[in-house]
Image (cartoon, grey):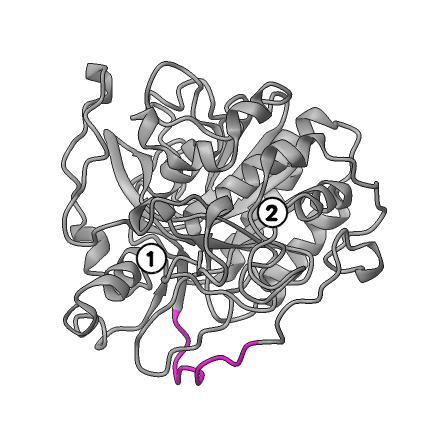
């Protein structure tokens, strides 16, 4: 299974681990909960909170989305299973997504963010979002910034429905948030790696939303993900964001005195440039680089470089703002931003070596029938049965998943 985790090689994780593993850093995940009993996360998950129905302390995941995100960040570095980019970070689970993997009111996310900040998180992952801006959530993001917390969010996924609004999702487009878009797996279309890609090649995963607010890029496709009871293959910006979140944890562990602004400056100042030189509206500053983010010589700054241009580690000289599609007559319902790679069937990642890691069948009934924008659907639409697949969802409101 470890050989299936192509993001580890692409991000040079092993080199970064020689210097930092995320020890001593608490990462909050606002999501569907986290399965603390998963073999890859045992001992990694702190008691959290459930703001959906109060049925747990956040260490139960009825969907699987949050567990996948958690393991990509802090999966244990053992002999098998999913290992995270920051394998010794601790996860603080905050359940804000319901059993349909969505939230109906951004106030629950705002409340969860404030709770996470007040309970020791120094890095926060938001693999969720929607079209509508929220003043309450904006206030909570400001609250986090004032308390020196780094917030990373996914940019979202394309939804080919009537009246689609293709802007980067909120809260990723809030100034100061590290907005992460998704990259394809180059091995699925070429034998070349990114460093050997031909000029003009497109590295963006086709299901990704992106735009002028995009800050960084990370792998998003054909990833092996942990889920309650086993594993699945996933794709989506939901799963790109945690790779940047984990990198922020590596930085905070290696440079414990660095403030949040400097952590962000390291993330953007050491990224591998993609597309138009400098920051652009497709890849942001480029591919996150955990090793360089930890080791690079990057100046300390006093203000978030994403809100204070004079402190930018790289000039924002990329493409002009992209025009988006017409706004939807009704706002899509916001929620998580990722799903199994195949929206109708499970695709087991690989047979696990340990019986505790046995892959179980994927039951998507609860997910595939709800009104959601799902990365998996988008990928399937991009690669295969576009018209047939999307027609199933035209009758329902979108869900930012």
Figure check: 301 above or below 78: below
Q: Which mark, residue 351?
A: none
Q: In the visual, does 320 lie left or right of 129?
A: right
The residue labelled by disc 1 is 375
Label 1 sits on a secondary structure element that is helix
Q: Which residues are magenta?
A: 322-332
Q: Main secondary structure of the magenta part?
A: loop
Figure check: 157 above or below 63: below
Q: Looking at the picture, how far across and down is residue 18, in whole percent?
A: 60, 18
Residue visible at 60% across and 76% down in the picture: 321
Label 2 sits on a secondary structure element that is loop
The residue labelled by disc 2 is 272
Figure check: 130 above or below 234: below
Q: Is residue 191 visible?
A: yes
Q: Is residue 70 visible?
A: no
Q: Are marks 2 and 1 in contact (CB under 8 Å)?
A: no
Mark 2 vs mark 1, foreground winner is 2
Using the image as rendered, state which of residue 104 and residue 39 is in the foreground: 39
Residue visible at 44% across and 52% down in the picture: 183
Q: Looking at the picture, how far across and down is residue 372, in whole percent?
A: 30, 63
Name the quadrant containing residue 378: bottom left
Q: Measure the C-alpha gap from mark 2 to mark 1.
A: 25 Å
Residue visible at 33% across and 23% down in the picture: 81
Q: In the rendered structure, does residue 203 fall within the stretch colored magenta?
A: no
């Amino acid at each position: 299974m470890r050989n299936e985790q192509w993001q580890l090689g692409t991000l040079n994780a092993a080199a970064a681990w020689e210097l930092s593993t995320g020890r001593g850093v608490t990462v909050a995940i606002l999501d569907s909960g986290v399965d603390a009993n998963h073999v890859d996360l045992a001992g990694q998950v702190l008691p959290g909170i459930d703001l959906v129905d109060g049925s747990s302390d956040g260490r139960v995941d009825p969907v699987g989305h949050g567990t996948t995100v958690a393991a990509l960040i802090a999966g244990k570095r053992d002999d098998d299973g999913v290992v995270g980019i920051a394998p010794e970070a601790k996860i603080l689970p905050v359940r804000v997504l319901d059993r349909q993997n969505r939230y109906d009111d951004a106030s629950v996310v705002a409340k969860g963010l404030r709770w996470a900040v007040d309970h020791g998180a120094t890095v926060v992952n938001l693999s969720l979002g929607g079209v509508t801006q929220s003043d309450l959530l904006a206030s909570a993001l400001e609250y986090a910034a004032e308390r020196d917390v780094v917030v990373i969010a996914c940019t979202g996924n394309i939804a080919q429905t009537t009246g689609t609004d293709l802007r980067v999702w909120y809260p990723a487009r809030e100034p100061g948030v590290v907005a992460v878009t998704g990259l394809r797996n180059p091995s699925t279309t070429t034998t070349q790696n990114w460093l050997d890609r031909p000029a003009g090649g497109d590295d963006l995963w086709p299901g990704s939303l992106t735009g002028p607010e995009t800050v960084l890029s990370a792998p998003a496709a054909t990833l092996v993900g942990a889920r309650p009871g086993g594993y699945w293959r996933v794709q989506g910006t939901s799963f790109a964001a945690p790779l940047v979140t984990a990198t922020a944890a590596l930085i905070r562990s290696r440079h414990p005195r660095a403030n949040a602004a400097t952590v962000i400056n390291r993330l953007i100042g050491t990224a591998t440039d993609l597309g138009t030189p400098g920051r652009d509206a497709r890849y942001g500053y480029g591919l996150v680089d955990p090793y360089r983010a930890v080791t690079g010589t990057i100046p300390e700054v006093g203000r978030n470089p994403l809100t204070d241009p004079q402190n930018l580690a790289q000039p924002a000289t990329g493409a002009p703002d992209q025009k988006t599609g017409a706004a939807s007559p009704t706002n899509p319902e916001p929620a998580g931003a990722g799903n199994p790679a195949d929206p109708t069937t499970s695709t087991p990642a690989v047979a696990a070596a340990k019986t505790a890691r046995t892959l179980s069948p994927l039951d998507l009934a609860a997910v595939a029938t709800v009104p959601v924008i799902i990365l998996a659907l988008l990928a399937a639409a991009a690669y295969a049965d576009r018209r047939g697949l999307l027609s199933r969802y035209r009758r329902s409101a979108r869900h930012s998943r």
